[in-house]
Amino acid sequence: MSEENIVLREATFNPKVKTYIFFIVLFFLITSIIGIILVPFWIFGLGQWLSGKFFKTLSCTITTKQLKFSKGLIVHIEKTIPLENIQDLSFIGGPILRAFDLTMIKVETAGGGGGHHNQNMMSMLGVENAEEFKQTILAQREKIIKEKYSFNQSPAAASASDIQLLSDIKNELVEIKNILAKK
């Protein structure tokens, strides 16, 4: 088994996510003109069935190198994020989420650029033991970054080529500084 596929932890999701989704969709149905027609169908079976189906699609796994997340019924979303690209993990918990005893974890990633901000963000609703899950992600991310950039290496272990490269960079910077000082 490759190291990328070793599962460190799988998320479990709070069953209250089903109720939350049921009421959020109900709210939007009630507030829209066309949705009012669908409210009875939603309340008397369709809502519970679809909320349960959606809940079963929720999946999140931390492997040694990646965070894998999937969700969705009609539009199924699967995201795989290299842990080293994660820039921020934050919790979102407004009054409605707190009423359902739920937390949303927002994961922001590096890269992408452009105007598509959502491509660099992922949200996970209802992860149980969210703080522990977050700490597992951050600990593994730290481990990967240390391995990749050899932060645990002592300065004495630097190779001669590294020292020469740093010396060359320093010399170039001194030249640039002198040129700028003359202007």
Image (cartoon, helix red, strand yellow):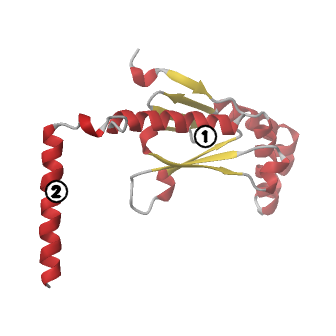
Looking at the rendered image, the quarter that the N terminus falls into is top left
In the picture, residue 42 is in which quadrant?
A: top right
Q: Which residue is mark 1?
A: 74
Percent from the top left, x then y, of residue 160? 14, 39
Q: Nearer the N terminus, badge 1 or badge 2? A: 1
Looking at the rendered image, the quarter that the C terminus falls into is bottom left
- Label 1 packing within 10 angstroms: few (<14), some (14-19), many (20+): few
Q: Residue at x 13, y 62 (%)?
A: 172
Q: Residue at x 81, y 53 (%)?
A: 96
In the picture, residue 77 is in which quadrant?
A: top right
Left or right: residue 28 versus residue 179 is right
In the picture, residue 54 is in which quadrant?
A: top right
Left or right: residue 142 versus residue 25 is left
Q: Residue at x 15, y 48 (%)?
A: 165
Indicate the amino acid at tag 1: Ile
Where residue 169 is drawn, which disc sits there?
2
The answer for how far apart the CA atoms under marks 1 and 2 are is 54 Å
Left or right: residue 134 versus residue 177 is right
The front one of 3 and 78 is 3
Percent from the top left, x then y, of residue 100? 83, 45
Q: Give the mark toward the camera: 1 or 2.
A: 2
Which element carries disc 2, helix, strand or loop? helix
> In this view, which residue lies farthest toward the top?
1
Indicate the amino acid at tag 2: Ile
- Label 2 packing within 10 angstroms: few (<14), some (14-19), many (20+): few
Percent from the top left, x then y, of residue 13? 71, 33
The front one of 52 and 148 is 148
